[in-house]
Image: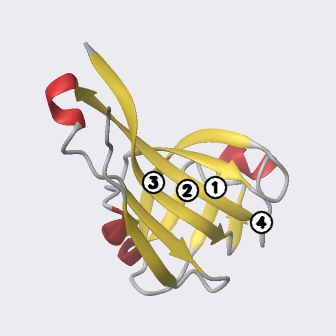
Amino acid sequence: MTRSFLNSKIHKGTITATDINYEGSCLIDISILNAAKILPFEKIDIYNITNGERLTTYAIAGPADSGEICANGACCHKINKHDEVIICSYIELQKNEIDNHKPTILYLNTNNEIVDNADIKIKFA
């Protein structure tokens, strides 16, 4: 049996652009993706802090060190430029993998620069 756990979190990213005519996905600065350990085309959930909307899409790599986070396609109906978002990916773990799992958590400022990160280790009693 596997259980789902947080794998990566980008906290308080700011949407820099939207493009409703793009076929879908969320473009994210590759430097942020790499630091968050999210791969291009990996499934992500986006939680819109500004308006409470939630959606699932996939990540695509944007230019390095650009700070870009661009919502594309249908998600533009739920996300606007300048909205603050949380972007997460999840992982399926076997029971024997849980104790050693550490999610990667990045905190961004309003320019989408990484200002802090946290390593959280799961502990069970």
Where does label 1 land, which residue? Answer: 72
The answer to whether the residues at label 1 and label 2 have Cβ atoms under 8 Å apart is yes
> Which quadrant would residue 60 be assigned to in this image?
bottom left
Q: Mark 3 or mark 1: which comes first in sequence?
A: 3
- Estimate the spatial distance between the alpha carbons at disc 1 and disc 2, rounded to whole Å: 6 Å
The answer to whether the residues at label 3 and label 4 have Cβ atoms under 8 Å apart is no
Q: Mark 4 or mark 2: which comes first in sequence?
A: 2
Q: Mark 4 or mark 1: which comes first in sequence?
A: 1
Q: Mark 2 or mark 3: which comes first in sequence?
A: 2
Q: Which mark is residue 83?
A: 4
Judging depth in this view, the residue of 61 and 34 nearest the camera is 34
Where does label 2 land, which residue? Answer: 26
Residue type of the residue flagged with mark 4: Asp
The answer to whether the residues at label 2 and label 3 have Cβ atoms under 8 Å apart is yes
Q: Nearer the viewer, mark 3 or mark 1?
A: 3
Q: Is residue 121 left or right of residue 111?
A: left
Q: Nearer the viewer, mark 4 or mark 2?
A: 4
State how many labels appear.
Answer: 4
**Residue drawn where x is 38% and y is 29% of the image:** 4
Residue type of the residue flagged with mark 1: Asn
Residue type of the residue flagged with mark 3: Ala
As drawn, which residue projects farthest toward the left? 96
